[in-house]
Image: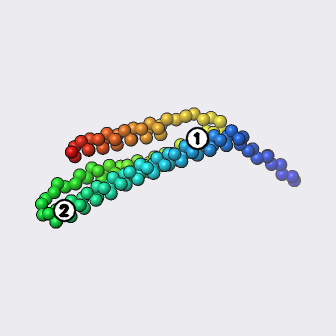
């Protein structure tokens, strides 16, 4: 028996460009999530540093200093979690768009864009309120 196999269907050049654009968008989302996680890490480490400096200064000066605010640490942890969530959501979006490109059924979805915008605006408002209260 002879086995008949269908010839492989290679994507058109235009499809390759669209797939590469999808990969570039995915990598941009990954860079954004890494940046958010890095900022959260720095914020959390700064809260730890200020707490340790408070103890050192209290021990050397002898005066009771105001205790550091733990909300900065919470904001840092939140940002690291947000960056991780964005990384996972961007992978899901990348795979969904890849499948839609292959099926020629692409429909843009602004959900990840809206989530990122709302998250960054809420963190910005939180930091502004925190800075106003600490001055």
Report the residue that reaches farthest toward the front: 61
Report the residue that reaches farthest toward the bottom: 60
The residue identified by callout 1 is: 97
Within the image, what quadrant is residue 24 found in?
top right
Residue 21, percent from left and from top: 60, 42
Viewer-proximal residue, 1 or 121? Answer: 121
Q: Nearer the viewer, mark 2 or mark 1?
A: 2
Is residue 118 in view?
yes
Residue 128, percent from left and from top: 29, 41
First in sequence, mark 2 or 1: give its number. 2
Residue at 87% in and 52% down: 2
Is residue 94 in view?
no
Query: Circle 2 sits in a helix, a strand or a loop, which is it?
Result: helix
Which numbered disc covers residue 57? 2
Q: How many marks?
A: 2
Residue 46, percent from left and from top: 30, 56
Query: Circle 1 sits in a helix, a strand or a loop, which is it?
Result: helix
Instruction: Say left or right for 33 vs 103.
Output: left
Within the image, what quadrant is residue 120 found in?
top left
Residue at 46% in and 47% down: 32
Instruction: Say left or right for 16 vs 30.
Output: right
Which numbered disc covers residue 52? none
| Labelled pair 2, 1 in contact (Cβ < 8 Å) | no
Report the residue that reaches farthest toward the right: 1
Quarter in which the C terminus is drawn: top left
Residue at 26% in and 44% down: 131
Instruction: Say left or right for 97 vs 111.
Output: right
**Category of crowding for the residue at label 2, using alpha-carbon neighbours closer than 10 angstroms: few (below 14), some (14–19), many (at least 20):** few
Instruction: Say left or right for 48 vs 41.
Output: left
**Category of crowding for the residue at label 1, using alpha-carbon neighbours closer than 10 angstroms: few (below 14), some (14–19), many (at least 20):** many
Residue 119, percent from left and from top: 39, 41
């Amino acid at each position: 028996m002879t086995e008949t196999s269908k010839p492989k269907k290679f994507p058109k050049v235009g499809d390759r460009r669209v797939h590469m654009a999808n990969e570039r968008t995915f990598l941009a989302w990954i860079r954004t999530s890494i940046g958010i996680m890095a900022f959260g890490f720095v914020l959390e480490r700064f809260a730890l540093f200020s707490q340790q400096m408070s103890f050192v200064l209290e021990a050397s000066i002898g005066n009771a200093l105001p205790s550091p605010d733990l909300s900065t640490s919470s904001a840092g942890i939140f940002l690291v979690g947000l960056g991780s969530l964005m990384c996972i959501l961007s992978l899901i979006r990348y795979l969904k768009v890849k499948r839609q490109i292959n099926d020629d059924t692409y429909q843009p979805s602004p959900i990840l864009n809206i989530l990122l915008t709302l998250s960054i605006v809420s963190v910005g408002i939180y930091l502004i309120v925190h800075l106003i209260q600490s001055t």
